[in-house]
Amino acid sequence: MSDPAKPITPAEAEVAKRASVPDVMIQIFNDLIVMNLDGQDAIIDITHVFEALKKAGHSAGDAAANGWLKSINTIYAEVGWTVRYEDNGAQQLIIFRKPTVSK
């Protein structure tokens, strides 16, 4: 007989959600950050993410339905980036900012 199911804790849910983001999504963001890094910030147009996903055999719908884009903020914040989203009506941008080093 198996153990009864237990509710997932918030921490377990967060770990499981991050783990559900495929490696290809992380690699796409890594590549785009490197290509777009200009000093303190890397500014990424979301359409470039969707184009790279399509080339990798995924769709924007996959990313939205599975919450991959929402998880990116947490994943990159955990390794030191400040991540913010901007939507000016014409473009949706994801901005990655390097941590400020105190002198």
Image (cartoon, rainbow, N blue to C red):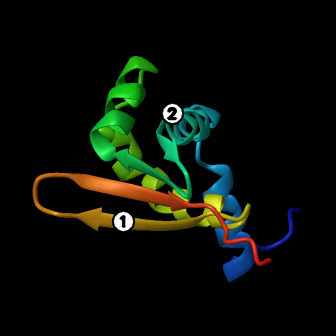
Q: Which residue is mark 2?
A: 35
**Dot 1: few (<14), some (14–19), or many (≥20) neighbours within 10 Å?**
few
Q: Which quadrant would residue 98 be assigned to in this image?
A: bottom right
**Residue found 36% across the figure and 51% down from its top:** 65
Q: In the image shown, does 34 or 16 lie closer to the viewer?
A: 34
The amino acid type, in three-letter code, at marker 2 is Met
Alpha carbons under labels 1 and 2: distance apart: 18 Å
**Residue found 65% across the figure and 69% down from its top:** 14
Q: In the image shown, does 35 or 72 lie closer to the viewer?
A: 35
Q: Nearer the viewer, mark 1 or mark 2?
A: 2
**Dot 2: few (<14), some (14–19), or many (≥20) neighbours within 10 Å?**
few
SS at badge 1: strand
Q: Which residue is mark 1?
A: 85
The amino acid type, in three-letter code, at marker 1 is Tyr
SS at badge 2: helix
Q: Residue furthest front?
A: 103
Q: In the image shown, does 37 or 55 lie closer to the viewer?
A: 37
Quadrant placement of the C terminus: bottom right
Q: Is residue 42 left or right of residue 21?
A: left
Quadrant placement of the N terminus: bottom right
